[in-house]
Structures are given as C-alpha cells and as structure tokens.
Amino acid sequence: ARLAPAPRVQSVSALPPEGPALDLGQFAGAARGRNAVWVILESTAAQYLGAYGAALDPTPNLTRVSQDALVFDAAYSAYPESIKGLWSMLCGESPAAQTTAKDYVAPCGSVASSLASAGYHRAFFHSGRFRYLGMQGIVDGRGFDAAYDAETIGGRHASSFGTDDASTVQRLLSHVDQLGGQRFFAVYSPISGHYPYKSPGDGPRPFPAKSEKEHYLNDLFAGDAAFGALVDGLRARGLHERTLYVIVGDHGEAFGQHEGNFAHTLQLFDENVRVPLIVSAPGLTVGRVRVPQIASTIDLGPTTLALLGLAPDQRHEGRSLLAPEPRVARFFTDHGPLLLGLRQGRFKAVYSSEHDRTQLFDLASDPGEQHDLARSHPERVERYRAHLLAWSASRRAALGR
C-alpha cells in the first residue's frame, strides 16, 4: 500500500544512549596512505558465517581474514535490498520509504568523491549488470573513475544474471596492475548468494544441496573462493599489507526462521537485516577484536575516511564507528506493508504501519526473535514508535517525498 503524504516533519529526538561501545580511537588514521577495498557481499546474513559462530562455515577465506580484524557483532543493513542498500553505503545516508531508484540519482556526499580529493583512483567492479533495477543511476555520478559490470567484464561463465565472481576479481586485479602504483579505492560487488542459488562458475560446492539453504551456502562458498583470490592477488603484488579491507553484507537472507519469511525484502528479522561487517588492515590488529557497538551500512564511508586519516563529510548521516559511543541502527522495508525497525543495545523494535503495532525483542536473551516483549515495556515501545515515525518522515522529506 502506498503511504499517505508525509506529515510535517518534526525533529527526530535522539534516543538516550544505551548499550556497550568499544573505544577504537587508536585506529583513527592507522590506515593512512593505504589502498582501500570494499567487498559488498550479496545477500549475506551474519548468522551464516563462521566468523559469527556458524557451525558450518561457507566462507573460510573470510574467516581467516577476520582472525586479525575488527568484527562488528551488531551491524545492520539500512534497507534489505541491493539497489537502495548500495546507495546507503556510497552516500552515507538512509533511503526513504516508497521511493524508487530514480529518486537517488542526485549528487550526494559520496565516499569515492572524498577519496578523489585525497588522490585516490576509484573504480567499481560488479559481477551483475548495472542496468538491473536502476543500479546504473546509483553508481553514476558517485566519483568513480571507472566502473565495470558483467557487460564489460565478459567472464568465463556468463549467465542471464551476470558473470562469475572469479572473472570480476581478475578484472579488478588487472585494473590495479594498470595504475602504476597509484593509491586506489576499489568497490568489489559479487553476486554469489543472490537467488536463484546457483551462481555462475566452477569450483567445489561442498554442501549436500538438498535444500534451498544448502544451495545458498554453496553459493557463499563459491563467492568466498573469489574473495580469497582477490586477497591472494593483492598479496602477490605486494599490496596486501598496504590495503584496508572493509567487508560487509548488503542485506541478509531468510530461510523460514519465521513464518513466511524467505529471501530478504519482506521482513526485518535479523536474518533479513543483520549483516557481517569486518574491517581488516593487515598488521594493525593482533587477534580478532569483537566490537559491540551497533553499526549501520550508512557508517561505512565515515568509518573508512576515519581509518584513512581523512576528514569526514558533514553531509553524511552516518558516523565513524571508531568512537566509543552507543549507537542506534534504523532500517525499514516497504515491499509489502511498511515496516520500520531499529536496534539499540540489547533491544530491537519493529513497527508495522498496517496494524499500528510495535514488536519488541531482547536479543541478548532471545536472539531468534521469538518472544515479543512489547506488553512488558510499554514506555520503551512508545518511545521507539514515535522515534521511528519521525525518522521515517524526515528521510522522506530529505528526498522531497
């Protein structure tokens, strides 16, 4: 259902600080002068990965990288869909409800533009096709010197959806070879993990493949092999120790953990919106550092700039995650009835516009989100409801909706 016209926007009152936060200030500027690589994992929920405690680990290369890295335990996608989710990362802002890709073509405080001012070469590498659902308009005008997708990469295993991730990695490495040592910012956006769960390419698929979830885990394994080739390729070029890696999921993927919840767009349970966020700067961390503060994909740009020792862009809604500040992550979905959600500390709230009802979960005691505590915490529920409605209206107003 379409939303009614947005009400007059009132200020979005800040929620009282709540929850743990680790002081990461010692890492500000610690990656100064390094290259930067963003790896945006398609349809990858944190709960399926070994670095986040999964018994079956479909991403062993990522797990190895995470052994000496900052691992954010509570990172959330701003929106459980790839196109507007990508915009949230590139521009450091939350999208708005009931908008389309064409609403996001205007200039923004792109992290690539900030890195251009610092002398970085910027390039985007995508195993899918930019013409998919308006992605071209999200990438264009964001400050990239070059952008490659399945149309221009070709690849060894082209399909209707894109090309194999291994070919995209080889195109990225070839591009790096042509830079003559110039510092670079590369965004690598694979497609392994996207439905239907049979990404193009060769290589082992170690899981039994008797269910959709096992097909999906095999896809994550195939995508992880390409990620391993990327790391190995940079290491062979003497660039691994001079590179900052920021690895994140664009959104999660559901397999019936809750009734009727499949794929990623219709619900806001953690399988839909909680994503991995791993920051690795080889040689700067010893051991895996678990980071408790709440994070959002809108924080990627500000955090990357802080790690590289560069000034923040004041246009960003997101903030650097290096400060020891308790945070709030907000997210929504509008592919069905509008749902607005937030995570603060141990609590997660989901507001349904269809029923004017808010669910409340304590993820510390109920990580599977099975027990609604709304009746036990009426004041907290009303505070979150008012906050989410004001925040959603403010985002619509920011985009002129």
Image (cartoon, helix red, strand yellow):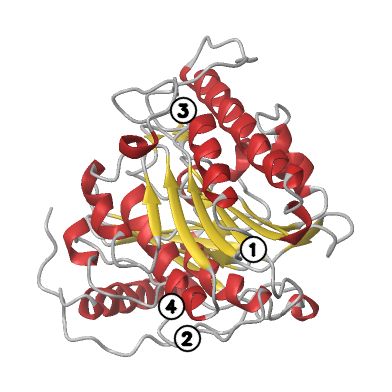
Q: Mark 1 is on which residue type?
A: Asn
Q: Amino acid at mark 2?
A: Ala
Mark 2 closeness class: few <14, some 14–19, many ≥20 residues within 10 Å: few
Label 4 crowding class (10 Å Cα cut-off): few <14, some 14-19, many 20+? few
Please identify, in this view, whether the residue under mark 4 or under mark 3 is nearer the observer: 3
First in sequence: mark 2 or mark 3? 2
Instruction: Of the two numbered discs 1 and 3 on the same chain, state the one appearing first in sequence.
Output: 1
Q: Secondary structure beneath disc 3?
A: loop
Spatial CA span between label 2 and label 3:
44 Å
Judging from the image, what secondary structure is the residue with disc 1 in?
strand
Tell me the element at label 2.
loop
Write down the residue under mark 2. 14
User: CA separation, marks 4 and 3?
Assistant: 46 Å
The residue that appears at 67% across and 33% down in the rendered structure is: 59
Foreground label between 2 and 4: 2
Query: Is any part of residue 56 visible from this angle?
Result: yes
Q: Is 247 above or below relative to 208?
A: below
CA gap, disc 1 to disc 3? 25 Å
For the residues labelled 2 and 4, the Cα–Cα distance comes to 10 Å
Q: Residue 162 falls in which quadrant of the image?
A: top left
Q: Is residue 213 above or below residue 257?
A: above
Which residue corresponds to mark 3?
164
Q: Which residue is mark 1?
A: 35
Q: Which residue is mark 4?
A: 383
Depth order, front residue of 225/207: 225
- Ranked by sequence position, the earlier of labels 1 and 4 is 1
Residue 9, percent across and down?
23, 86
Marks 2, 1: nearer the viewer:
1
Of the two numbered discs 2 and 3 in the rendering, the one whose residue sits closer to the viewer: 3
Counting from the top left corner in percent of width and height, residue 37 is at 59, 56
- Of tags 1 and 3, the one toward the viewer is 1
